Image (spheres, rainbow, N blue to C red):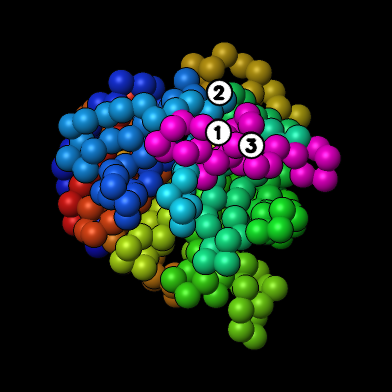
Amino acid sequence: MTRSRTLQVHPVGHDGAEDVVVATSGRHEGAVYTGTVDGAVLRVSHDGLRVEQVGSTGGRPLGIEVDPDGRLLVCDSHRGVLRMDPDTGAVEQVLAAVDGVPMVFCNNAAIATDGTVWFSDSSRHFGIDRWKDDFVQDTASGRLLALRPDGSVETVLDGLRFANGVALAPDESFVVVAETRGRTLVRHWLAGDRAGTRDLLVSDLPGYPDNIARGSDGLIWVSIASPTDPVVERLGRAPLFVRKGVTKIPERFQPAPKRTCRVQAYDAAGTLVHDLDLDTPDFHMATGVREHDGRVWIGSLHEPSVGVVDL
């Protein structure tokens, strides 16, 4: 099922186009939005040839969604949950703290039809600038939260091993959060006999998942930022003092993501439908993925570009 395809790479002029979302209506229908390391939020034309900055969060935008009213919902790792008007660039800070404690690593979100924003906070200890510390030390301090339309916030899942991408089932019967360090997709049931319980939609992924998103095809698309690293897996069984020590050695000696670009798609039963091993020397570390009308857009935490491949 693994397929090797050539990825089209479109430069955006800014480093670290981490996530991608496609506008499905309005005058910018078909355009792709992404956020970069300098705080910029960019709009990329459907053909990838035109790039314009629509605003800046003043922080580090990661996950991006489009609200029903056409505004952008942005998970900013430094500033929390934001909304941005893509026409004016105006930014509204929606949520910066939970129970009076500022978030340090707001990461990704999905918006339900009732207006609930399901979002992840990757770590209580380390921000994005020290994501490797959390990853190697395996703090298991990530969480999945629900921001209700009335402004109330609920921590739904806690103790996650680097909570990352978030997606809803096509019928919104469950919400899924990627557990990067655990290489799993954790499912929290919202409806039916299992409502309020958790299980795994997918376990033992072939690498470390980052952002996830439900595509127009109804599948849950998963970016695999790096294949499974045997050194990292062995470190996970080591005492905490050893794991902490690894993060203090020079970075060139620390475990690092491998140069790959891979995305997968699963159905609501957790069955693998697509496994794309994308062939390109110019793009690596896929951290965002979005399928729309048979095209798969990909973002990267490090690359100054977005990629796209036709199914």
Decide if residue 173 is on the left or right side of residue 215.
right
Decide if residue 146 is on the left or right side of residue 113.
right
Residue contact between numbered discs 1 and 3, judged by CB atoms under 8 Å: yes
The label number, if any, that marks residue 58 in the structure image: 2
Q: Earlier in the sequence, mark 1 or mark 2?
A: 2
Q: Residue at x 63, y 29 (%)?
A: 78
Q: Name the element at disc 1.
A: strand
Q: Name the element at disc 2.
A: loop
Q: Residue at x 61, y 16 (%)?
A: 249
Q: Earlier in the sequence, mark 2 or mark 3?
A: 2
State the residue position of label 3.
Answer: 93
Identify which residue, 140 or 288, lies in the foreground.
288
Where, by quadrant of the figure, is residue 269 drawn? bottom left
> Label 3 amino acid?
Gln
- How far apart are the alpha carbons under marks 2 and 3? 11 Å
Are there few (<14), some (14-19), or many (20+) residues within 10 Å of tag 1?
A: some
Residue range highlighted in magenta: 73-101
Q: Quadrant of the C terminus?
A: bottom left
Q: Is residue 224 above or below residue 260?
A: below
Q: Is residue 77 magenta?
A: yes
Q: Is residue 249 above or below residue 197?
A: above
Q: Is residue 53 magenta?
A: no
State the residue position of label 1.
Answer: 91
Identify which residue, 249 or 129, lies in the foreground.
129
Residue contact between numbered discs 1 and 2, judged by CB atoms under 8 Å: yes
Whether residue 129 is visible, yes or no, is yes
> Label 2 amino acid?
Gly
